[in-house]
């Protein structure tokens, strides 16, 4: 792809990066206490916290993949997401936010030690750190690769720019810098999508009805396409199909998104730390509602962007003498390759939008990446600093009482730098992901493979009081095995067949991979190993965790005092809960 950005586009990108660094410097004042650096003094405005939460969760992966998903399945996946919202909002508002806000923790994983044991707390920290590292590495790599391709810039340059800038302003300003830069980044995300929608509407003289009709025509044409290697057939998602090999249905997407949101709000320090930074439960609830509404608006906007771009290109399509449809996508993208569909929005911005607006879209893409990276870096630094403080408090028990009162801001800043550097380097390793996966398919097979285990720790702790530490540890192991087995089912099957441990079994699904092999010199016919849909991975993993923990609790019952530590015992006196809570 050739770069078509103008000087003014690069000026917009540089201005955005400088502004983020300047905000970090400005907010670095008075960052001297742990509570100021980690939690903004617990005085952060609820609206800013809400926008920060959605900025962190809606990464550049979503910003790239949602418009591309319209080319995959029309608007059906968006309907699945909207179906999940009422249930997940009700659960988080009624149960998660008020319960966790009672304790006034700095790190969410402090709860796990009181509820289970120190070992379970350590496990929670390890799970979160692994998830955050994978998440941020994935965000840095995918967004940087997209920017590098559409702008014809070396991947290393983009990786360093995204990683270094977000690390520096997070290092300087702590959670305040994260929250307020996230607010600006949400505005950029909205502005970038609205620019694209307005441009297509203005230049074509069309609007949503025509765009929706074009999506239907595209999905009718696509199944007739003669797919070559590396291509995937677009098709609308059915309402429900019980087969685990069907990529997505409205119901399975709804269930998967509901599980993801609940686990993320129950056990992810990135979100819980935001709520801890507000002054009380009422403000935390307002933050959650603000973030949820902003999430719906952003996802709706990105779906409309996808419809607009599909119409823009599909309306220019020509049919060859052989009946082959030719869609003139910019940058020589192939609309039948799932990975290329994720790049359509970014390529459109650089090729079609007026000078300056293309740079604004690229800035929005950078903003989406940085909003996830800064959150992850800050949260990891917070969690690790709290763990260091815990060990110092252990030493205090033998006489060194002065150490617990120390500020850990300096340590947290060094941890922030180290984490940012590691994430930037680690992003290279994700280039080995299978090319056939798009962004949406890859998420549950990488960082979101850990999300059900991480969220399940808290869900079991809050709602299953009979479960103790040992059943919890065992069920976490089973949950991770489930995520990995389902996520890499095809690859595992391939390896088992290569070892002659798995007999060949035929499947009729045209989307599954063909795998061939030989056994002890005897020719063996081609066999097929199906891939489990990404939408089943997280729900199955969480179900295994909850059920196994409950069943194991009958073998090894919990004998700890649960007063105030579970939903059923929340009204019993607990020394961890301040009187005003």
Image: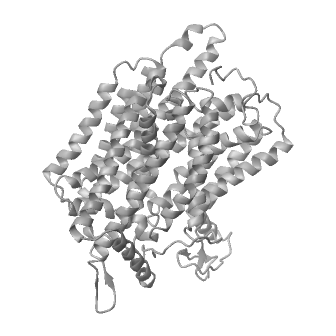
Q: Which quadrant does the C terminus fall into? A: top right
| Residue occupying the point 36% across, 45% down | 186
Q: Is residue 324 above or below residue 20?
A: below
Q: Quadrant of residue 523?
A: bottom right
Asked if one can make out residue 228 in the rendered structure from this viewpoint, the answer is no
Q: From the viewer's side, name the closer residue of 179 and 418.
A: 179
Q: Residue furthest bottom?
A: 321
Q: From the viewer's side, name the closer residue of 247 and 215.
A: 215
Picture colour scheme: one colour
Number of residue marks: 0
In the image, taking residue 22 as reference, residue 481 lies left or right, namely: right
Q: Quadrant of residue 527?
A: bottom right
| Residue occupying the point 68% across, 75% down | 503
Task: Residue 356 in the image: state x and y as whole percent.
Answer: 18, 52
Task: Residue 189 in the image: state x and y as whole percent.
Answer: 34, 49
Q: Is residue 307 above or below residue 395?
A: below
| Residue occupying the point 53% across, 34% down | 284
In the image, taking residue 413 as reference, residue 7 lies left or right, namely: left
Q: Is residue 71 above or below residue 148?
A: below
Asked if one can make out residue 199 in the rendered structure from this viewpoint, the answer is yes
| Residue occupying the point 48% across, 62% down | 78
Q: From the viewer's side, name the closer residue of 348 and 432.
A: 348
Q: Which quadrant does the N terminus fall into? A: bottom left
Q: Residue furthest right?
A: 555
Task: Residue 578 in the image: state x and y as whole percent.
Answer: 64, 20
Q: Quadrant of residue 11?
A: top left
Task: Residue 506 in the image: state x and y as whole percent.
Answer: 63, 80
């Amino acid at each position: 792809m050739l770069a078509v950005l103008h000087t003014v586009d690069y000026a917009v990108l540089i201005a955005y990066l400088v502004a983020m660094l300047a905000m970090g410097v400005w907010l670095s004042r008075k960052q001297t206490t742990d509570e100021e650096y980690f939690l903004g003094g617990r005085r952060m405005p609820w609206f800013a916290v809400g926008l920060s939460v959605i900025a962190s969760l809606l990464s550049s992966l979503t910003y790239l993949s949602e418009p591309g998903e319209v080319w995959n399945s029309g608007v059906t996946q968006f309907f699945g997401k909207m179906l999940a919202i009422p249930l997940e909002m009700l659960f988080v508002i009624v149960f998660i936010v008020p319960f966790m806000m009672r304790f006034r923790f700095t790190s969410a994983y402090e709860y796990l030690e009181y509820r289970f044991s120190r070992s379970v707390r350590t496990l929670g920290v390890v799970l979160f750190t692994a998830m955050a590292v994978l998440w941020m590495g994935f965000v840095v790599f995918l967004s940087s690769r997209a920017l590098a391709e559409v702008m014809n810039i070396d991947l290393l340059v983009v990786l360093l720019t995204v990683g270094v800038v977000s690390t520096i302003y997070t290092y300087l300003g702590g959670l305040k810098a994260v929250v307020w830069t996230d607010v600006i980044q949400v505005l950029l995300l909205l502005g970038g999508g609205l620019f694209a929608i307005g441009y297509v509407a203005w230049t074509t003289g069309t609007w949503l009805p025509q765009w929706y009709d074009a999506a239907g025509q595209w999905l009718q044409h696509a199944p007739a396409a003669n797919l070559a290697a590396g291509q995937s057939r677009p098709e609308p998602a059915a309402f429900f199909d019980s087969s685990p090999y069907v990529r997505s249905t409205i119901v399975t997407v709804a269930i998967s998104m509901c599980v993801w949101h609940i686990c993320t709000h129950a056990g992810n320090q990135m979100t819980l730390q935001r709520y801890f930074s507000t002054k009380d439960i009422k403000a935390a609830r307002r933050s959650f509602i603000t973030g949820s509404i902003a999430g719906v608006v952003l996802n709706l906007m990105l779906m409309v962007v996808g419809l607009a771009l599909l119409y823009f290109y599909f309306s220019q399509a020509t049919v060859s003498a052989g009946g082959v449809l030719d869609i003139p996508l910019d940058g020589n993208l192939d609309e039948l390759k799932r990975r290329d569909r994720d790049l359509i929005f970014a390529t459109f911005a650089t090729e079609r939008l007026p000078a300056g607006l293309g740079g604004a879209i690229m800035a929005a893409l950078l903003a989406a990446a940085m909003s996830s990276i800064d959150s992850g870096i800050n949260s990891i630094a917070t969690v690790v600093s709290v763990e260091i403080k815990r060990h110092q408090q252990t030493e205090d028990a033998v006489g060194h009482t002065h150490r617990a009162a120390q500020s850990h801001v300096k340590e947290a800043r060094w941890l922030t730098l180290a984490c940012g550097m590691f994430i930037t380097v680690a992003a290279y390793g994700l280039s080995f992901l299978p090319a056939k996966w798009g962004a949406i398919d890859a998420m549950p097979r990488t960082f979101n493979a850990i999300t059900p285990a991480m969220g399940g720790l808290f869900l079991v702790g809050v709602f299953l009081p009979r479960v103790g530490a040992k059943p919890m540890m065992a069920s976490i192991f089973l949950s991770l095995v489930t995520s990995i087995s389902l996520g890499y089912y095809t690859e595992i099957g391939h390896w088992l067949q290569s070892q002659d441990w798995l007999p060949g079994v035929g499947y009729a699904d045209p989307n599954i991979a063909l795998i061939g092999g030989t056994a002890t010199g005897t020719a063996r016919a081609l066999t097929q190993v199906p891939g489990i849909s990404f939408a089943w991975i997280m729900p199955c993993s969480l179900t295994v965790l909850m059920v196994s923990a409950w069943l194991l609790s009958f073998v090894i019952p919990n004998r700890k005092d649960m007063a105030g530590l579970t939903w059923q015992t929340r009204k019993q006196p607990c020394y961890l809960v301040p009187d005003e809570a």
